[in-house]
Image (cartoon, grey):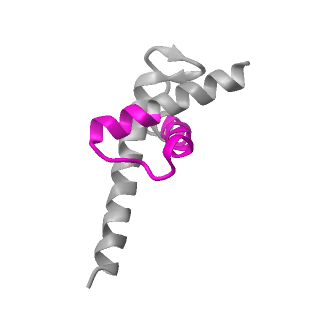
Amino acid sequence: MAFLWSLIIGGIIGWLAGLIMGRDIPGGIIGNIIAGFIGAWLGSFLLGNWGPVVGDFYFIPALIGSLVLVFIVSLIMGAMGKRRTP
């Protein structure tokens, strides 16, 4: 049950990051979950573990890390799109 809760919270964090940045994350729900998990790791690595804990995620660092991840992914996807268009 804890794994399912982590998937749900990871998806919500990834969805919120995409919503705040105004960009869609490729992959839909699975992409949101992956962005939430990677963002949580990135946020904890950069900012440490602090703030409220929800579903084994430190929410604020996870959200900030997901925002950084969404920004980087959108830059890469934008660069790839510009390169393909003549």
Q: Position of residue 3 (x, y in %)?
A: 70, 26
| Image point (45%, 36%), residue name | 14
In the displayed structure image, the side of residue 2 where residue 40 appears, left or right? left
**Name of the residue lying farthest toward the bottom:** 86
Q: Position of residue 19 (x, y in %)?
A: 32, 36
The answer to whether residue 74 shows anywhere in this view is: yes
Q: Position of residue 55 (x, y in %)?
A: 58, 19
Residue 71 is inside the magenta segment: no
| Magenta residues, start to end | 14-41
Question: The C terminus lies in which quarter of the figure?
Answer: bottom left
The front one of 28 and 83 is 28
The front one of 7 and 52 is 7
| Image point (37%, 63%), residue name | 77
Question: The N terminus lies in which quarter of the figure?
Answer: top right
| Image point (33%, 50%), residue name | 71
State whether residue 37 is above or below residue 84: above
Q: Main secondary structure of the magenta part?
A: helix
Q: Position of residue 50 (x, y in %)?
A: 45, 20
